[in-house]
Image: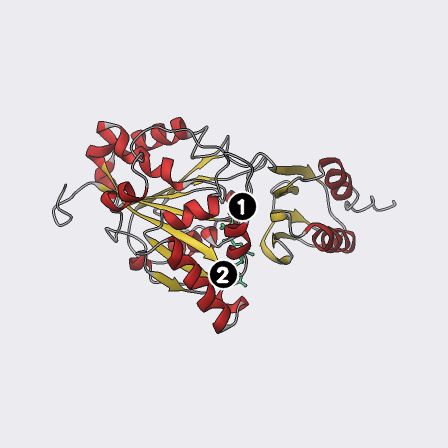
Amino acid sequence: MADARVDTRVPVTVLTGFLGSGKTTLLNRILTENHGKKLAVIENEFGEVGVDDALITRRFDTQEEIFEMNNGCICCTVRGDLIRILGKLLKRKEKLDGILIETTGLADPAPVAQTFFMDESMKEFARLDGIITLVDAKHITQHLDEEKPEGAENEAVEQVVFADRLLLNKTDLLSEDELAAVERRLRAINKVAPITRCQNAVVPIESVLDVHAFDLDRILSIDPSFLEDGEHEHDQRITSIGFEKEGDLDMDKLNAWISKLLQQRGVDIYRMKGVLSIRGSDDKYAFHAVHMLFSGETIEAWGEAPRVNKLIVIGKNLPRDEIVNAFNACFAEPTPM
Ligand SMILES: Nc1nc2c(ncn2[C@@H]2O[C@H](COP(=O)(O)OP(=O)(O)OP(=O)(O)O)[C@@H](O)[C@H]2O)c(=O)[nH]1
């Protein structure tokens, strides 16, 4: 095993955690904080339409390069793309202080981690530094408890099992007793990863980057077949509906639809996120929902950019036609001349 003190390979951090747990919030902090590191970020999103690009905040003097991988899930279909991007990055490894991979909220981190032990050039140039798992304190228990169809894995459990660091985020939404109960639950699944409580993913950057936390022996003791290329299956009931549509939305209609949708189907709607164009506003409106909790805020001005609404809905047994029709009905009527 390489000695950490003289190891010059590029450290790779895998940022994982269920949908809406706070991965992009943490990534934005890393990208906007002045830590002096030159990082490359690989972003993978679940869903038909990519929204994260518009939600990622970049510093003006940004040192980071961001690669989007939106044609499939990083742990299955686009692993080939991941290996190609990593291959390109590692050719100029002298210029890099680290690589950060944000998985989708529905990814199994194990096959992503495995990538760094599979091929010789990867092993030579990169070292898996740690798997950092964001945990949504409010919703994790229901995800851990969720019954999955025969053969399908529970990604929320996998993300906790393989974590080298657990960031228990959204502590503002639970009482002290509830938080302690969640911590006990996490500890029962993962005996060793330090658990750090946080809000808005505020943790010292040095506690997540370059921490030398990944331990192959521990992983092999949990999953002896970790280094073999095994198959895994996701819950096929979970799908996404994506919108990419020009025009202005009527805020009242939008609010009424979202409130009704989340009241009726909030248990099965894991995540909604979007950047929307609202009639009468010059600014982009960023919208987030995680189950029944939703929020929105104006972000930057549209300026010259085309006012295209991007919205993604991710959930279980989604009624596609109903959701598509209801969203389309939220557009503002054209103003009479
Ligand atoms: N109340 C509360 N909300 C939070 C906290 N941290 C993040 N959020 C909100 O939770 C929502 C989801 O956060 P993201 O960072 O986008 O989550 P994510 O893990 O990247 O989500 P996906 O990319 O969909 O998997 C956003 O509305 C955040 O503002 C927190 O500590 N408390």
Say above or below: 333 vs 167. above
As measured in the structure, the alpha-carbon distance from the residue carrying label 2 to the one carrying label 1 is: 26 Å
Instruction: Return the residue at label 2.
Output: 137
Quarter in which the N terminus is drawn:
top left
Q: Nearer the viewer, mark 2 or mark 1?
A: 2
The numbered mark, 2 or 1, whose residue comes first in the sequence reads: 1
Q: Picture quarter containing residue 29?
A: bottom left
Q: Residues within 10 Å of mark 1 (few under 14, many from 20)?
A: some
Q: Image point 27% across, 43% down: which residue?
A: 221
Q: Amino acid at mark 2?
A: Ala
Q: Image point 36% across, 61% down: which residue?
A: 195
**Residue 61 appears in view:** no
Q: Image point 50% across, 51% down: which residue?
A: 144
Quarter in which the C terminus is drawn:
top right
Q: Which mark is residue 54?
A: 1
Dot 1 lies on which element? Answer: helix
Say above or below: 9 vs 211. above
